[in-house]
Image (cartoon, rainbow, N blue to C red):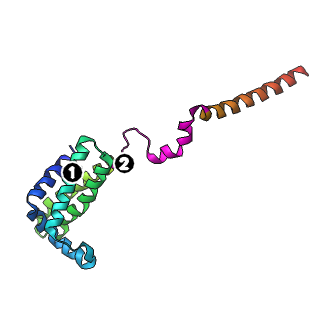
Amino acid sequence: MLSAPFVAGGLRTLRRPEAAAEAVGPALRAVGKRVPVLAGDPLRLGRITGAMQATAGLLFATGRAPRMAALTLAATLVPTSLSTHAFWTVEDPQERARQRALFLTDLSALGGLLLAAADTHGKPSLAYRSRHALDHRHPVKAVRRPVEAAASSTAHHAKALAATLAR
C-alpha cells in the first residue's frame, strides 16, 4: 500500500515528464546556480526520478530488497516534495492549505519509508550478526565457558562448605 503512489506516479512521470519538469524546473535552476553539476535537463531528471520511483516501488511492493527500495523512495521523495509542494511560496490561502496538506502527506509517507528501511523483519542487523559471529559459529563453546565457570564456582563453594563442616 505504501508503494502504490510511487509506482503510479513514477509511471505517470515516465509517460509524461513535462508536468514533472515544469514543477521541478524552478528548483532545479536555483540549485544549478549553486551546484553546476546538478544543473541539468528537467525532462531527463523527471524521467530518471520516475523510473527510480516506479522500480523501487515495485521492488518494495514485491518484497525484493525492501530496505534498499524504501531508502530509494525516501531519497526521491524529499526533493520531489520540496519542489512540487512548496506551500511557503503560495500566496492564495486555499491553495496554500492544499499544498501544505500534500506536503504533510508526503512527510508522513517519508516517515513510513524510513521505518520500513530500518525494519529487519525480526532478523538481527548485519552489525549485530557480525558482533556475535563467534557465538553463532561455535554455540557449544559459547555455552561451555559460562557453564564451566559456574560449575567451577559451585565446586569451589561446595569444597569450602565441606571443609567448614568437617571441622
Horizontal arrangement in the rendering, residue 38 relative to residue 16 (left or right): right
Using the image as rendered, state which of residue 89 and residue 35 is in the foreground. 35
State whether residue 71 is above or below residue 87. Answer: above
Q: Residue visible at 28% across and 50% down?
A: 69
Asked whether residue 38 appears in the rendered view, the answer is: yes
Horizontal arrangement in the rendering, residue 98 relative to residue 129 (left or right): left
Magenta span main SS: helix
Residue type, mark 1 in image: Thr
Residue farthest to the top, as pictured: 166
Locate residue 79, reporting x and y percent. 24, 63
Label 2 sits on a secondary structure element that is helix
Locate residue 167, reporting x and y percent. 91, 22
Residue farthest to the bottom, as pictured: 33
The answer to whether residue 1 is magenta is: no
Front label number (2 vs 1): 1
Label 1 sits on a secondary structure element that is helix
Using the image as rendered, state which of residue 97 and residue 5 is in the foreground. 5
Quarter of the rendering containing residue 134:
top right
Quarter of the rendering containing residue 31:
bottom left
Locate residue 46, reporting x and y percent. 16, 63
Asked whether residue 86 appears in the rendered view, the answer is: no
Q: Which mark is residue 55?
A: 1
Locate residue 75, reporting x and y percent. 28, 58
Q: Residue visible at 87% across and 24% down?
A: 163
Horizontal arrangement in the rendering, residue 150 relative to residue 79 (left or right): right
The magenta-colored residue range is 117-140
Horizontal arrangement in the rendering, residue 156 relative to residue 146 (left or right): right
Packing grade of label 1 (10 A; few <14, some 14-19, many >=20) is some
Count of marks, rendered view = 2
Residue type, mark 2 in image: Ala
Q: Name the residue carrying label 2.
A: 118
Packing grade of label 2 (10 A; few <14, some 14-19, many >=20) is some
